[in-house]
Image (cartoon, coloured by chain):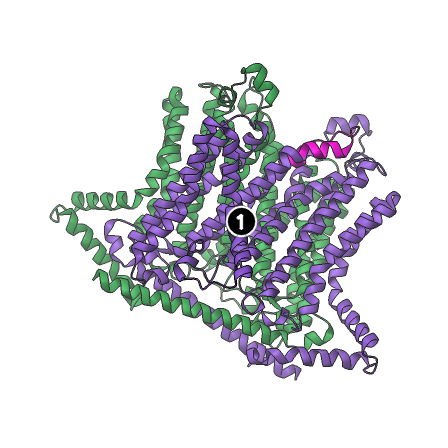
Chain colours: A purple, B green
Amino acid sequence: MGENDDSEIIEHHVEEEMEKKASRSHTASSSFLESVTPSDREGHSGTQSSHRLLAYSDALISIIATVMILPVAHTKVEDNEELRQSVQALLTTKIGVYLMTFLIVTVAWAAHIRLFQVIVRIDDCLALLNLACMMLITFLPYTFSLMATFPEHILGILLFCGCVMVMGVIQSLIVLYAFSRPFLLNEQIQISENQTFYKQHILKVIMRVPIMCLFASIFSFIFFQLSYVLLAIVIFLPYISQSLKWCRNKAIGQVEETPDSMLFYTYLPNEPLTKERVEAFSDGVYAIVATLLILDICEDNVPDPSVVQKQFGGSLIAALQSYGPEYLAYFGSFATVGLLWFVHHSLFLHVTKTTRLMGLLNTLSLAFVGGLPLAYQLTHEFPHNSRNELEAIQISCVIIFFAGIFQLTIWVVALYNEQETLHPYVRYGGREHVFMLAKLALYPCVALGTFFLTCILSKFSASIFHLMEITVPFAFLVLRLLVRVGLALLRLIFCPERSDPKTAIEEEEEEARVPFNPIVT
Amino acid sequence: MGENDDSEIIEHHVEEEMEKKASRSHTASSSFLESVTPSDREGHSGTQSSHRLLAYSDALISIIATVMILPVAHTKVEDNEELRQSVQALLTTKIGVYLMTFLIVTVAWAAHIRLFQVIVRIDDCLALLNLACMMLITFLPYTFSLMATFPEHILGILLFCGCVMVMGVIQSLIVLYAFSRPFLLNEQIQISENQTFYKQHILKVIMRVPIMCLFASIFSFIFFQLSYVLLAIVIFLPYISQSLKWCRNKAIGQVEETPDSMLFYTYLPNEPLTKERVEAFSDGVYAIVATLLILDICEDNVPDPSVVQKQFGGSLIAALQSYGPEYLAYFGSFATVGLLWFVHHSLFLHVTKTTRLMGLLNTLSLAFVGGLPLAYQLTHEFPHNSRNELEAIQISCVIIFFAGIFQLTIWVVALYNEQETLHPYVRYGGREHVFMLAKLALYPCVALGTFFLTCILSKFSASIFHLMEITVPFAFLVLRLLVRVGLALLRLIFCPERSDPKTAIEEEEEEARVPFNPIVT
C-alpha cells in the first residue's frame, strides 16, 4: 500500500506542478492580452496583478502596527521603585499608544483589504497612489504619540484627522480611477449593470471615516474631549456594529438580508477578510516581533573596548557574561514568538475562510504577541529573586496566556460555523481535531501552569520560567505522540473492553477517515 | 473595438478566477490525499505546502539583513568635526558590519532557497527545525558586531563559527529527515532512481561551509588573521566560483556540463533562485527600510511636556518646528524607498527567471537601499549651507544612484539572456522596452544630475535636493507620457518625412505589437 500511495502522490505532484505552470503562463498571457486595451492609447500603463503590491502593503502595515512597542520597551524601569507603579505609569501612556496604534492600523488595513477586493488589478498610477496612502498610514503612530504625551493639546488630533482625511481623498481617487477603467475591477462588479451604484456606495463607505474625522477636528477647537470620543467611535465602530448585528440576529432571529445591505461594510460579503492577507499580515507581525530584541542586543550589548580593558582586564568573555540575561531574553522571546507563529500557521492551514470575528480575535492575539519582547526583557532586568522579577515573569505568563488563548478562540469561533470556515480534518470528529486542540491549548496551559507555580514557589520563579522556555519546543516536537498516548489512555479508562491500545488507535483512524472519503474521492 | 476588448477581458477574468478556484480546491484535496499516507501511522503530522513557512523565513531574513544599518544610523556625527573623518571612522567598523551582515545573510538565504527547492512539502517537525535555523541566522549580526569591535579577540570568530556549524547540523538533520520521507521531496528527486546519491551530494554541499568554519575556529587559536581570510572565502566563494566559471566559459567556450556538475551549487540548475522568494525577500527589505525612520521619530521626536512648558511657553507647534527636518527626512526616505520598490516591482513583473548574477545585483541594490535612511538622516542633521550638509546630500545622491544603477544592471544582464529571463514585452523591440528603460534610468539620472548640480550650485544644494524629492514621484506619474513624447520627438528629428506625431505613435504601436501576436493568439 505504501508503494501505491507514494506513486499516487508523485503523480499528483507532477500534475499539480504542471497545472501551476499552466496557470502561470495563462496569467502571463492574459496580462499581455489585457495590456492591449484602449487604455494604453491614453498614455496609461498596462495592468498588473495586484498580488505583490498587497504583499508589500501588508509588510509595511504589520511593521507599523508593531514598532510602537519599542518606545514602551525602551522605557527604563528604575530598579528601586516598585515595578507595579512604573507599569501603571507605562500603562497610561505608552501601552495605550501601542494598543491604539495597533487597532487603528488594523482598521486601516481592513479598509485596504476591502478596497483591493474590489480592485483586483493595478497599474502604475494605482501603485503610486497606494504608496502615498501607505506613507500616511505609517505616520499615524506619531500622531498617537503626540496625543498621548499632550492629551490637552489639539495638535495631535488635528494631525491625525488631517492624515485620515488626506487618506480618504487618496482612496476616493483610487476608486474613481479604477471605475473609470473597469478592467481593473473585480469581475463581479465588472459584469454588474449598476456600476454607478457600486461606485457611489463604495465612495460613501470610504468617506464615512474622513467625515467623522472632519467633525472631530472641528470639535477639537470647541470641546476637545468630544473629539476623542469621535475618534474612539471611528476605531471601534466596525466591531460594535458587527456585534450589535450579531446580537440582534440572535435575539430576533436571522433577518433575510438583501445583497445591498450585506455590502454595507464588506463589498464582497462572501469573503470579509482575504485569508491570504490575514496570513501575510500575521507573518509580518510575528517576524518583526521575533527580531525586535536582536536590534537592541546589537546596539547596546557590544561593550566598549576601553571599558573591557579597564574593568575586566581585557577579558571579553567576562565582559559579555554580564549580558547573559539579555541573550536568554532574546532566545526565549524568539522561541516563544516562533512557536506561536507555528501554532498560527498550523491553524490557518486548516482555515478556509476568515470571518470578521476571527479577524478581530487574530488582531487581539497579535497585539499580545507584540508585547512579548517587552515582557521578556523585563524578566531579566531585575536582580534575581526580587519582587520585581517575580512580577515581570508573571506578566510574561499573562501575555503568553492571552496570545495563546485568543488563537484558541479563533478556532472555537470557527467551529461554530465549521462548514464554511474549516477544513473537514479539524472539524468536530475530524482526525486532526484533537491534535489541533492540543496544539492550540499547549501555550495557554503552560503559561497558566507557570503562573500558578510561580505564585506558589516564588523563590524558584526564574528557574521555573526558564525550564518552561526550554521544554515547550520539545513538547511541540512530541505533541502528536503525546496526543495519541493520551487518547489511548482515555479509551483504556472509559472503554476498558477495548483494551488493546494499538487497535484503538487504528480504529480511531478508521473512524476519523470516514467523513473525508467524499473529499478524497 | 473597446467594447469587444472589454468583454474579452471579462471572460478572461472569470476563466482565470475559476481556474484559480479549481487549482485551490485541487491543492486542498491533494493535501488531504497526501495526509493519508503511511507516515501518519508512525505518529507524524500530515504534510503541508511550504509556502507560508518560506514567506515567514523570507520576512525574518530580510529584517535581519537590514537592521544592522540602525547602529550606523544611531552613531551621532559630531557637528564640529568634519563629516568626512567621521564617515571614515564609521566606514571602518559599522558600515563594514552592515555590509558583511547583509552579504552573509543573503548567502544563508540562498542556501535556504536551495534547500527548500529540494524539499517542497513540510511537516511540523521540519517547520520547528527551520525555526531553530532561523534563530541562529538572526544571531549572526551580533557576532559580526563583536568581530568589528574586537577584531583581535577570537570570541567573535568562535561564536560565528559555532552558529554556522550548528546551522549545518540542523540543515543536515532537515535533509536526512526529508529523505527518510520521500513524499516531502521535489518530484524530480522523488522519481529519480539514485536518491542516495542526491542525499549524499546535498549533504556534502551543505557541510562544506560548516567544515570551513571549523577550520577557521581552529586556526583562530593559532593565527587569527587566517580565520578572517577563511570567513571571507565562505562569503564570497559562491560569487567567485560563479564568475570564474563564467570567465572560463567565455575564454574556452561553452563546456558541455553533465547534469551532475551543474547540480554542484544549485540542486535544480534550471532555477538558480526562485523568483517568488527573491521578490518576497526584496519586499521585506524595502518595507523595513521604508519604516526605519518612523521608529526613530516616534521615539525621539516627541518633546517632553516640561520642556515644552519651559522653553516654548507651552506652544507645542513651536516645539515641534525644530523637528521639521526630521519629518522631511522621513517622508523623503519613505518616498525614495517606495519608488525604488515600485521600479523593482515593475521590473520583476517582466522577469520570468532569476539567474545567480541577477540575484547578486539585486542584493547589491538592496544593500544600498538599506543605507538610504541613514543618508537622509544625515542631510538634515547639519546647519543649513554648511560643508557637512553639502557632503551629506552628495552621499545621499551617490547611494540613490547606486541603488538605481544596480536595478538597471539587473535588466541589462537579463537582456543578455532575454529568451530565458524576460517577458517578450521588455525584450529588445518589445513595446514596453523603452518605457522600462526610462523607469529604471530615472533614479540614476536624477541622482547624477542632482549630484553635479550641487557641485556647481553648492549654495542651493538643500533646495535642489528637496526639489528633486518632490518632483520625482510626479515624474513617475507622467513617465509614460514623457516617453511617448520623447519617442515622437526623436522620430520627428530623425525621420522628418513622417512628420505627423500622432500617426507616428500609432505606427510605433503597430510595430511594437507585431512580435507579440504569437503570444496573444
Height in image: B235 above or below A417?
A: above
Q: Quadrant of the C terminus of chain B?
A: bottom left
Height in image: A429 above or below B491?
A: below
Name the residue nearer the viewer: B501 or A431: A431
| Mark 1: secondary structure | helix
Residue located beneath label 1 in the image? A240
Give the residue drawn at x 79%, y 56%.
A471
Query: x, y (%) of residue A204?
Result: 37, 47
Residue B333 appearing in the image? yes
Name the residue nearer the viewer: A352 or B95: A352
Residue interval drawn in magenta: A71-90
Give the residue drawn at x 30%, y 59%.
A194
Query: x, y (%) of residue A13?
Result: 54, 74
- Side of B416 relative to A401 (left or right): left
Q: What's the chain of the residue with tag 1?
A: A
Residue A342 appearing in the image? no
Residue at the extreme front: A252
